[in-house]
Amino acid sequence: MKNDIQLLQVSYNKQNVGKLAMGDKAKCLFEYDSAWLKTGFSISPFFLPLKTGVFVAKHEPFNGLFGVFNDSMPDGWGNLLLDRFLSSKGINIEALTVIDRLAFVGKSGMGALSYQPDNSEIYRMRSPDLNSIAKQVSDILSERADIPTIKSILKLTGSSGGARPKVLINHMNATWMVKFASSNDDRNIGKQEYFYSELAKKCGIEMSETKLFENNYFGTRLFDRNQDERFHVHSASGLLDASHRFPSLDYTQLAKATLALTKNTNELIKLLRLMVFNVAIENKDDHAKNFSYIFKNGNWNLSPAYDLLKSEGFANEHATAIAGVGNPNRKDMMKVASEIKFSEKQMKNIIENVFDICLSSKIGEALRKRNL
């Protein structure tokens, strides 16, 4: 493994997209390949439009990296594993640039983008013993694990984002992500997330297939791939240059961005329904990386929803505000619709539909007590 890389080749399903390099003041530079300019698409429409020339990244919020490439980076759990493993190899992780870290992502990241040179530890898809992995995860979190254990889990993790421990497995000829409890989680968190995924589907929220493995571990089929084909995925965080580490967005902004990107009112409705569901279940960890867009068949669409779970968020308020409010009511959700000139009647119908279904579920009593 080599670090101190100055230039990366960016590819999309084995097609050359462009070159990414380190520029002055630790800011990255990117230029589309000439062939991609003729036949490709903008991988980040708001900040990397499909045109000639060298683009210069801003220093914030992604340490000099463009948002679309920051989406490839591991976060939380993935970084924990990678840093411990690299440190064991004598690599000074403090000296690594964002370019170095993308090389460690290589072709193992989420979505369709890959990076060369590829310094990733390539993992083989298999169906491991999940109970055994849960024990290894616990050892890693308590710093009892040895390097071979960390390496074995790193191979299964790939470069997935998010804070909770997770691995990628092959199940029913598809790639699934299986999550485990972190040291701060309730031991039944897997069952809880599965319940909310099923409730979301009843509320008309588009989700990828979910499953409770071993009656304990929450799993979801990855929506960024179909057998050998992989799809380009772009988070709202990367698309809008919005940090997910602190509150940085409002659903009004998200709604306007969704309509501008997808040019499809149906995708806007999907986002508004998701907003209402997050309010209903108190999913306050609805930060900028928990919304994504997927590019398929020449079109951008809102991706299937993910990470739906009752959570405290930042200071017990929604990470993404609702018309400027962190703990909103129905009036605030209606204000979002008003600000984007969305039908008042349709918005009321969405709210009533989602709330009626949630009220009839096991969270109904808690929802009624909130008097929304």
Image (cartoon, helix red, strand yellow):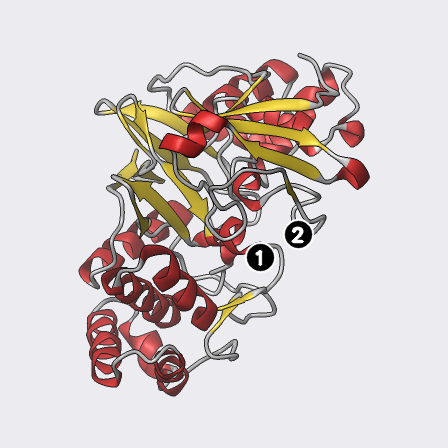
Give residue 242's mark: 1
Task: Determine which residue is flagged by label 2.
Answer: 61
- Decide if residue 282 is in sight here: no
Relative side of 322 to 100, left or right:
left
Disc 2 marks which amino acid? Pro
| x and y, in percent, of residue 236 in the image | 47, 54
Relative side of 317 to 195, left or right:
right
Contact, CB < 8 Å: mark 1 with mark 2? yes
76 above or below 267? above
| x and y, in percent, of residue 106 in the image | 53, 22
341 above or below 229? below
Cα distance between the residues tagged 1 and 2 = 7 Å
Residue at the spot 36% in from the left edge and 31% down from the top edge: 39
Q: Residues within 10 Å of mark 2 (few under 14, many from 20)?
A: some
Disc 1 marks which amino acid? Ala
- Taking depth in this image into account, of 173 and 199 the one nearest to the observer is 173
Relative side of 27 to 336, left or right:
right
Secondary structure of the residue carrying numbered label 2:
loop
